[in-house]
Amino acid sequence: MAAIGLLLILIALSILGERTLALFGGDRILAARFYKTLYVALGAGMLSCALPALVTGFATQLRALIVRARTSGMWTDALLSDRMLEQAHTVSLVLAFLTAVAGVVAAVLVWCGIMWPSEP
């Protein structure tokens, strides 16, 4: 749900576009830098909010597929164990945290002009 909220904020900001230029005193370079940084940060936040649901959903679907296929073996026994969903949830939270940290780093790099520079 939070990811959808962040997506709606991104859409609203992209619709506003030039109308918010007055907030930056007419400075287009500063406005471009600010919006690029904001888009990167909100995009990473959106992805990190969606990752736990994606990973646990994938793990649940994988378990259902294995049960339907009636396969057996060492890997399938490990995937069908009760701890697998707990581990998938833990992995999803770690991935969400790493994505959030990477988003902050990317936003700082965009703000500094190292990544996605405004004008050459």
Image (cartoon, helix red, strand yellow):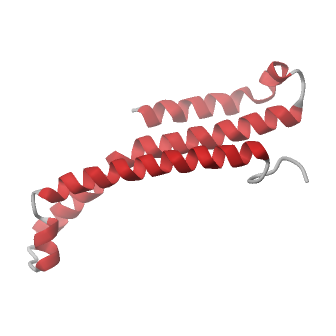
Number of numbered discs on residues: 0
The image quadrant of residue 27 is top right
Q: Is residue 24 left or right of residue 36?
A: right
* Residue 54 visible to the viewer: no
x, y percent for residue 24:
83, 23
Residue at 74% x, 34% y is: 34
Residue 82 to residue 67: above or below: above
Q: Nearer the viewer, residue 88 or 62?
A: 88
Residue 44 to residue 28: above or below: below
Residue at 78% x, 22% y is: 20
x, y percent for residue 10:
60, 34
* Residue 26 visible to the viewer: yes
Q: Is residue 21 left or right of residue 100?
A: right
Residue 61 to residue 20: above or below: below
Residue at 90% x, 24% y is: 26
x, y percent for residue 7:
53, 36
